[in-house]
Image (spheres, helix red, strand yellow):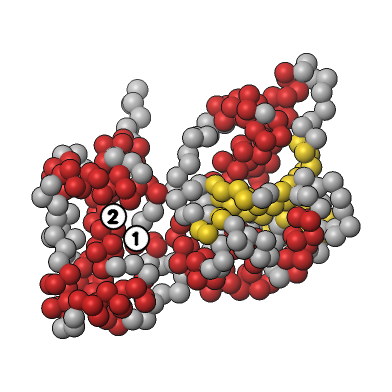
């Protein structure tokens, strides 16, 4: 039997607690069915908080704790850390982390006892606070990339991955990646067969492995500490209005009345990228919107973002999203709802 503790805290996401529990309950039901109702459950779980008191989540759902986190407890196979809801930017996340500092020693203790520690979404920051990830790798919600890299330089961030595991330390990407995490744990402790049935019966895409198609530069800019580099801010404004034109570093430098080398230096300082890389991401964002909302041909989409060669655009798009433009359109195209038939 796999004994799971879900640690709850203020501002944790309700679905990151309840959805995995539904999947574990489904796995137990499938296991019982396969064994004629004679087998005991594969998973058992409890909700734990620092003080043993329940919490009200940002969505208004109250989660009741089964008790306080017991430092002396043994036999805990997995500790799940639900994503922390972020409505006040990274400053709000850091404030939450400050309140959760008493959890760090408890997490370190659970890990030393052999438990798997699994963090969903922004809770990867909480796991990284323990320093257990130092020298290893992790992922997190994609729009917190800059904040994570800045705060935890000793951790290799594999942002494209929906889920990572390093020496019993599991991290997942944005939001609903808790579904992939729960299925992973079902597979780990119950086997591939039961995990596959869970995925099919609950309509979960078990093959989702990359966050790349979901990344949006407009949301990434809202992440973390917004930079205050006046020159880069002027450059970004100029570039955002010229997404439909080929990018020219020379033209950008001339607009800013500085040298090209100065522009490159400021972009590295403020964004950690080059002006060309930033321009490409802007163009990919525009291409995504066109593929999602229009029936324009690939050639026309390429032209709309300033690429005369559709082949170059296709290669850039595949490199940045992990999908071809055609596959992206197939997966993300916005379809109008059909009206109900009137009798």
**Residue located at (14% from left, 72% from top):** 250
Hey, which quadrant is residue 195 in on the image?
Answer: top right
Q: Please, what secondary structure does the residue beneath circle 1 have?
A: helix
**Residue located at (72% from left, 55% from top):** 7
Mark 2 residue crowding within 10 angstroms, few (<14) / some (14–19) / many (20+): some
Q: Position of residue 148 (x, y in %)?
A: 52, 65
Please name whichever residue, 202 or 254, is drawn nearer the observer in this view of the structure. Answer: 254
The answer to whether one can see residue 14 in this image is no
Residue at the extreme top of the image, as rendered: 36
Q: Is residue 87 above or below residue 79?
A: below
Mark 2 or 1 closer to N-term? 1
Q: Position of residue 158 (x, y in %)?
A: 49, 54
**Residue located at (35% from left, 22% from top):** 343
The answer to whether one can see residue 261 in this image is yes
Residue at the extreme left of the image, as rendered: 308
How far apart are the alpha carbons under marks 2 and 1?
7 Å
Q: Which mark is residue 274?
A: none
Mark 2–mark 1 CB contact (< 8 Å)? yes
Q: Which mark is residue 285?
A: 2
Q: Is residue 3 above or below residue 38?
A: below
**Residue located at (77% from left, 66% from top):** 105
Q: Is residue 134 above or below residue 197?
A: below
Residue at the extreme right of the image, as rendered: 72
Please name whichever residue, 94 or 72, is drawn nearer the observer in this view of the structure. Answer: 72
Tag 1 residue: 217
Mark 1 residue crowding within 10 angstroms, few (<14) / some (14–19) / many (20+): some
């Amino acid at each position: 039997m796999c004994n799971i503790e879900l640690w709850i805290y203020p501002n944790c996401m309700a679905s990151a607690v309840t959805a995995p529990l539904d999947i574990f309950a489904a796995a137990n039901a499938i296991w019982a069915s396969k064994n004629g109702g004679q087998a005991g459950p594969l998973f058992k779980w409890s909700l734990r908080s620092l003080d043993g008191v329940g919490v009200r989540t940002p969505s208004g759902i109250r989660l009741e704790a089964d008790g306080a986190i017991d430092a002396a407890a043994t036999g805990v196979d997995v500790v799940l850390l639900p994503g922390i809801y972020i409505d006040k930017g990274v400053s709000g996340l850091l404030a939450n982390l400050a309140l959760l500092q008493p959890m760090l020693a408890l997490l370190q203790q659970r890990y030393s006892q052999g438990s798997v520690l699994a963090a969903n979404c922004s809770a990867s920051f909480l796991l990284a606070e323990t320093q257990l990830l130092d020298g290893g790798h992790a992922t997190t919600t994609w729009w917190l990339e800059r904040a994570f890299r800045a705060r935890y330089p000793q951790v290799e961030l594999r942002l494209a991955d929906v889920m990572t595991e390093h020496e019993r330390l599991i991290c997942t990407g944005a939001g609903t990646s808790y579904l992939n995490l729960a299925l992973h744990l079902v597979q780990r402790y119950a086997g591939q067969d039961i995990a596959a049935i869970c995925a099919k019966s609950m309509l979960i895409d078990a093959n989702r492995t990359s966050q790349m198609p979901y990344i949006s530069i407009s949301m990434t800019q809202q992440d973390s500490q917004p930079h205050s580099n006046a020159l880069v801010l002027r450059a970004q404004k100029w570039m955002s209005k010229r997404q439909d034109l080929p990018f020219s570093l020379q033209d950008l430098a001339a607009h800013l009345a500085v040298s090209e080398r100065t522009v490159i230096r400021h972009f590295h300082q403020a964004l950690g990228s080059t002006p060309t890389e930033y321009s490409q991401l802007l163009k990919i964002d525009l291409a995504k919107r066109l593929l999602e909302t229009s029936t324009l041909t690939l050639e026309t989409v390429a032209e709309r973002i300033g690429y005369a060669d559709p082949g170059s655009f296709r290669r850039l798009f595949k490199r940045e999203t992990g999908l071809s433009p055609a596959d992206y359109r197939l997966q993300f195209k916005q379809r109008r709802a059909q009206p109900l038939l009137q009798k």
